[in-house]
Image (cartoon, helix red, strand yellow):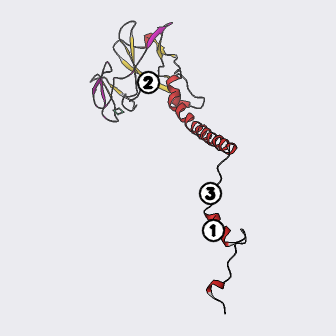
């Protein structure tokens, strides 16, 4: 007859006997050696470095996209828009010219326009056709002597100042000069909004 105490003890095949398995559970890891500590520190530094490199690789193109236009020199060109005698004093007319840096495939979109007014024998003033609000083309109303924007009701006085509506600033003016009997407009970039 066998008693409870006589039941065979289970032996952990990996560790030899039951008391060994029990002691393994409570075993304390041996202290790390100096070599191991140095290795862990090196791995830690490498993972931080890798994280910084990945962050830079992701963010640098985005930052460049935002900041580049601030440092890029916008091209400007003088464009002839007609002989001086083709313009009557006091008249405001629409003139079309090629943008400063047209893309090779731009086609007709390479062209831009301005409202040109001859003030006297030698002086002209040119306004951008693009509304200062969101860039819609403005129309010159000869009778009212106002520039009107059809998009959101922006109105400008004949000198380009805002008369009504949402435009945040006056119409942009282009520099104008006369060269060899030709009226020329400088194709400056137009601030919108
Ligand atoms: Fe001209 Fe909005 S684009 S008023």
Q: Is residue 136 left or right of residue 14?
A: left
Q: Which mark is residue 40?
A: none
Secondary structure category for the residue under label 3: loop
First of labels 3, 2 by sequence position: 3
Q: CA distance from mark 3 to mark 2?
A: 73 Å
Relative to residue 87, is residue 52 depicted above or below?
below
Residue at 55%, 26% (x, y): give it: 102
Q: Position of residue 158 (x, y in %)?
A: 30, 20
Separation of disc 1 and disc 2 at Cα?
Answer: 81 Å
Figure quadrant of the N terminus = bottom right
- At a point 58% along the width and 28% down the height, the residue shown is 103
Read off the residue under disc 1: 22
**Residue that carries the numbered disc 3 in the rendered image:** 28
Is residue 69 in view from this perspective?
yes
Q: Quadrant of ligand 1?
A: top left
Q: In the rendered structure, are the residues bearing label 1 and label 3 in contact, judged by CB atoms less than 8 Å apart?
A: no
For label 3, count other residues whose C-alpha is less than 10 Å away and answer few (under 14), some (14-19) or many (20+): few
Q: Viewer-nearest of labels 1 and 2? A: 1
Label pair 3/2, CB-CB below 8 angstroms: no
Q: Which residue is mark 2?
A: 190
Please say whether residue 161 is one of the residues in the magenta stretch: yes
**Which is more N-terminal, label 2 or label 1?**
1
Q: Which of marks 3 and 1 precedes in the sequence?
A: 1
How crowded is the residue under tag 1: few (<14 C-alpha within 10 Å), some, or many (20+)?
Answer: few
Establish whether ligand 1 lies closer than 8 Å to the Cβ of label 2: no
Q: List x then y, in percent, for residue 59.
A: 55, 37
Helix, strand or loop at mark 2: loop
Q: Which contiguous range is marked in magenta?
A: 152-179
């Amino acid at each position: 007859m066998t008693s409870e105490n006589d039941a065979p003890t289970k032996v952990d095949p990996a560790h030899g006997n039951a008391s060994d398995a029990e002691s393994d559970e409570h075993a304390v890891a041996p202290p790390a050696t100096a070599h191991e500590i140095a290795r862990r520190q090196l791995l830690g530094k490498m993972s931080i470095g890798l994280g910084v490199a990945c962050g830079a690789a992701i963010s640098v193109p985005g930052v460049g996209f935002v900041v580049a236009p601030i440092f890029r020199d916008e091209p400007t060109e003088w464009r002839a828009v007609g002989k001086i005698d083709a313009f009557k004093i006091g008249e405001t007319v629409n003139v079309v010219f090629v943008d400063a840096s047209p893309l090779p495939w731009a086609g007709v979109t390479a062209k831009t326009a301005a409202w040109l007014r001859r003030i006297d024998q030698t002086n002209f003033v040119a306004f951008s056709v693009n509304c200062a609000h969101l860039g819609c083309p403005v129309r010159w109303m000869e009778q009212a002597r106002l520039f009107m924007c059809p998009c959101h009701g922006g109105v400008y006085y004949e000198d380009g100042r805002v008369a009504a509506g949402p435009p945040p600033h006056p119409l942009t003016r282009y520099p104008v000069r006369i060269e060899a009997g030709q009226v020329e407009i400088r194709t400056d970039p137009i601030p919108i909004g």
